[in-house]
Amino acid sequence: MKKILILGAGTGGTIMANKLRKSLDREEWDITIVDKHKTHYYQPGFLFIPFGIYNKQDVIKPKANFIPAGVNLIYSDIDKVVAEENKVLLEGGKVLNYDFLIVATGTRVDPDETPGLKGELWHKEIFDFYTVEGALALQEYFETWKGGKLVMSIAELPFKCPVAPLEFVFLADEYFTKVGIRDKVDITYVTPLPGAFTKPKATKMLGALLEEKNIKVIPDFYLESVDNKEKKIKSYDGLEIPFDVLTIVPVNKGDDMVERSGMGDDLNFIPTDKHTLRSEKYENIFVLGDASNIPTSKAGSVVHFAAEVLFDNLLCAIKGRELRAKFDGHANCYIETGFGKGSLIDFNYETEPLPGTYPLPGIGPFGLLQNTKMNHYGKVIFRWIYWHMLLKGKELPVENHMSMAGKKKS
């Protein structure tokens, strides 16, 4: 019997397990998925926890709930991949052989990479919201905070969900307005980017929204260290920014297993063909989602769109055919902007976010680069779609490749 091995039972790995099990003959193909954690986290929901919109139970479910019958689920740490021998070593010495390997081990935050970040103020006055622990600690802190300098900083590129820090400051503006202390809170958005986002039209729209909400932007800030005693962040060129409370996106890195396997770059992301999603080095290894180094957003929508391409290409590889499906870097991100409104961006490798309507030309119902209530509803309803449709590999009414229909170029 031939074997497909999936490393990582997060969004990408779970989607692939469901799609492959439905399509491949159970008498011919054994499918195994490995992950060290038993809990599946709805990571986009972490953003809402500090503001009391979601609680922990809203963002967790057992991973086993989403792995289909006929797929072997193993809970274990992964030691390393021995690609030349088509095998994976698990913690404790167990060996798993494979004919095809899908690496979907994602990315993780590593606060230890930044000097001073994980010091005496960690989860006391310095917080992340990219872990459920950090989000919960920040929620508790905000409940009694009386105001001061709130700094939202990004340690380094790339990082998961590039719009999340923007959403955080928008929601902070709403939260502190509603609790009556917005006039006592200075909100500053600190980014290594030259503006609010990576692309001109989106940067213009989001920058105007930040200005409207009296949120200061400090661009081109490359974080060097955090001073816990003086409560300042310092850049490599000597700029210092004081804070009373610091929220930060720590350095994002691929799984340590990637480093032990000798498969990754300096940040443990795996060099991957950006169109076929096959490893640049190994023909029987495919890489999905945040684990890869492809030049697009590390976001759930990208995993969903890329999974369709990887699925088609893996079936081609199984049959010994040329990989025909091409991923275009399609990303689609709802941006919560506060007070019951949101924006939406849709883009790919070649095309920046443009104004228009989505997914139906002229109809929508969602507005691209617009700040609307309907976009907010799209953000909210996605949690249900994620748990009940996306993870189970069900078809969604959106195209995998970005369409120009409904978009305005000028």
Image (tube, rainbow, N blue to C red):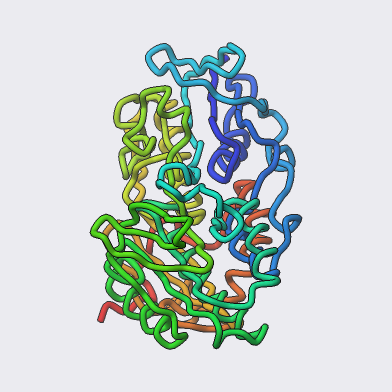
Looking at the rendered image, the quarter that the C terminus falls into is bottom left
* Residue situated in front as seen by the camera: 271 or 195: 195
- Determine whether, in the image, residue 232 is placed left or right of residue 105: left
Q: Measuring from the top left, give residue 3's x and y in whole percent.
A: 54, 20
Name the residue: 52% across, 83% down. 372
* Residue situated in front as seen by the camera: 361 or 350: 350
Q: Measuring from the top left, give residue 322's x and y in whole percent.
A: 32, 32
Name the residue: 58% across, 11% down. 93
Q: Quadrant of residue 297?
A: bottom left
* Residue situated in front as seen by the camera: 297 or 355: 297
* Residue situated in front as seen by the camera: 394 or 285: 285
Q: Measuring from the top left, give residue 136's x and y in whole percent.
A: 67, 58
> Compared to 204, does 297 lie above or below?
above
> Compared to 363, does 99 lie above or below?
above
Viewer can see residue 394: yes
Q: Measuring from the top left, give residue 197's x and y in whole percent.
A: 35, 68
- Determine whether, in the image, residue 407 is placed left or right of residue 365: left
Name the residue: 58% across, 71% down. 378
Q: Quadrant of residue 178?
A: bottom right
Q: Quadrant of residue 24?
A: top right
